[in-house]
Every structure is written in structure tokens, then in C-alpha cells.
Image (cartoon, rainbow, N blue to C red):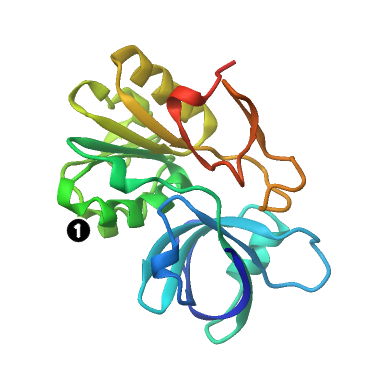
């Protein structure tokens, strides 16, 4: 069951332009699946809503988040100092079921979608998954994943690192048994269509705006073969075969 708690900030540092690594003091290791998230808050009144932030890594006594500064809520979160407290609700959602995976595995991500790939690569280290990561310019979190992954393929839109262009231009699902994907919706749709064409199993972590995080408000619904599903409660990780594309 998800829990409310106050947690002390251990570390809050900018690791790339507008991207922050936030480490909090929390015991959550056995309860967490890669791909799950917490709702975070550090304010009393405004903004009203908590912010859903994906779990990047879990260690004994701590949980790490990667947070992109995009608005009022995240600006407050990334301004916290070591020793200050933050409110947490979680872990929430449905993560990647690593026990069902095997063979050759590819992790495909774009931008802040790399966050859950850190813990995911750690849980799949026995398979040495390949990483395909796309960024606008400067990359981040790749060094942490290198410890557990096989091959690393990077793309940047400005060509500063790796392939100049999009990660979907360098990814080929042909050689993989399973593909795990997280990132911008347009990128994931391309990966999903490509995997379907190749007849490959794919799991995607959907990115949707969330309000409650527990499935009550129905703000974050997505279309599946069984009707609309709640991204926060039934996802954010879905079997690609279930999703209906426009």
C-alpha cells in the first residue's frame, strides 16, 4: 500500500541544464518496481496539486528521483536544500515486471524518460540490456546505467554527442526479445509501431498529466483495447499490445 511520509533531503543537485537529481531518505527498496513513481510536495498552499516524479534508483535507506524544472511545482522541489523535508506519497502505479523478462533486452528512452532506466538496468543487469537514449543536447544518467548495461547508443538533436537526430532513427528492434520504453509520447508511439512491425514484445511507461496519482480523478486516462485505463493506477507501464494508437 502507498504511504504518506515526510522525508529528509540528502542531496539535490543540478546534473544537466534544468535537470536535478534529488535523493531522499526513505526505506522503500522491497516495495518498489522500476517504472513506479511517487507524488511529491514541499508546499502548504500553492500550487495545490502534488507532482508525480518517477523513481530513478533505490538504495538501502534512500530513493533517487530525476526532476525536470518545468513549472511552479518542480521549481519549488528543485530549490530544496540538504536537510530540508519533502512530503512523499508512494510508491504508486504499476512498474515493469522484470521477472517476466529474458533474452536480449533493449531500453529505449528520450529525455527525462531515462529516469526509470537506472533502476531498471540494475534489476536486469544479468541480461546486460542495451540502452538507446535520446536527448536534445547534453545527456545525463548514462554513467549510472553503464554499470549494468551492455551497449550504449546515444543520440542528440544538436549532434553534440552520438548520433545527430532522434533515438528512433538508430533503434532497430530486430535483434531483441523485449523492448522497454519511456519518454515523450511521440517517441514512444514510433517505438511501439516499429516493435509491432517487427513482431517484438514492447512495454511502455506512459507520460500523462496526473492530478491525484491514485486513480480517483480520471485525468490521466489512456486508450486500450479494454477501454480507457488510468495511467496512474493501471499504469504507467503498459503492455504495448494493449494500447490503442490514434
**Residue 186 placement (x, y as % from top left):** 52, 27
Can I make out residue 28 in this image?
yes
Can I make out residue 19 in this image?
no
Query: Which residue sits at x=45%, y=50%?
Result: 35
Q: Is residue 42 left or right of residue 65?
A: right
Query: Which residue sits at x=17%, y=42%?
Result: 151
**Residue 143 placement (x, y as % from top left):** 26, 57
Query: Which residue sits at x=28%, y=27%?
Result: 171
Q: Which residue is mark 1?
A: 147
Residue 103 vertical placement versus 90 (above, below): above
Q: Nearer the viewer, residue 199 or 225?
A: 225
Q: Quadrant of residue 229?
A: top right
Q: Nearer the viewer, residue 233 or 164?
A: 233
**Residue 101 placement (x, y as % from top left):** 27, 40
Figure label count: 1
Residue 109 vertical placement versus 185 (above, below): below
**Residue 130 placement (x, y as % from top left):** 22, 40
Q: Nearer the viewer, residue 152 or 246?
A: 246
Around disc 1, counting alpha carbons within 10 Å, would you say few (fewer than 14), some (14 to 19), or many (20 or more)? few
Amino acid at each position: 500500500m502507498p504511504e504518506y511520509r515526510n522525508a529528509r533531503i540528502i542531496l539535490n543537485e543540478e546534473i544537466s541544464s534544468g535537470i536535478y537529481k534529488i535523493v531522499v531518505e526513505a526505506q522503500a527498496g522491497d516495495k518498489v518496481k522500476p517504472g513506479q513513481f511517487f507524488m511529491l510536495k514541499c508546499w502548504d498552499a500553492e500550487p495545490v496539486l502534488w507532482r508525480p516524479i518517477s523513481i530513478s534508483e533505490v538504495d538501502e535507506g534512500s530513493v533517487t528521483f530525476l526532476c525536470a524544472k518545468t513549472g511552479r511545482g518542480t521549481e519549488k522541489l528543485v530549490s530544496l536544500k540538504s536537510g530540508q523535508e519533502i512530503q512523499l506519497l508512494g510508491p504508486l502505479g504499476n512498474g515493469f515486471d522484470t521477472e517476466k523478462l529474458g533474452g536480449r533486452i533493449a531500453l529505449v528512452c528520450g529525455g527525462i524518460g531515462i529516469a526509470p532506466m537506472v533502476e531498471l538496468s540494475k534489476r536486469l543487469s544479468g541480461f546486460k540490456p542495451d540502452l538507446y537514449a535520446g536527448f536534445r543536447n547534453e545527456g545525463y544518467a548514462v554513467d549510472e546505467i553503464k554499470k549494468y548495461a551492455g551497449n550504449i547508443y546515444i543520440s542528440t538533436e544538436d549532434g553534440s554527442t552520438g548520433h545527430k537526430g532522434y533515438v528512433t532513427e538508430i533503434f532497430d528492434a530486430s535483434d531483441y526479445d523485449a523492448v522497454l520504453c519511456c519518454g515523450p509520447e511521440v517517441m514512444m508511439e514510433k517505438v511501439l509501431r516499429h516493435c509491432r512491425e517487427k513482431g517484438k514484445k514492447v512495454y511502455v511507461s506512459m507520460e500523462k498529466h496526473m492530478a491525484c496519482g491514485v486513480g480517483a480523478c480520471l485525468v490521466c486516462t489512456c486508450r486500450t483495447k479494454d477501454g480507457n485505463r488510468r495511467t496512474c493506477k493501471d499504469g504507467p507501464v503498459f503492455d504495448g499490445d494493449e494500447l490503442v494508437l490514434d
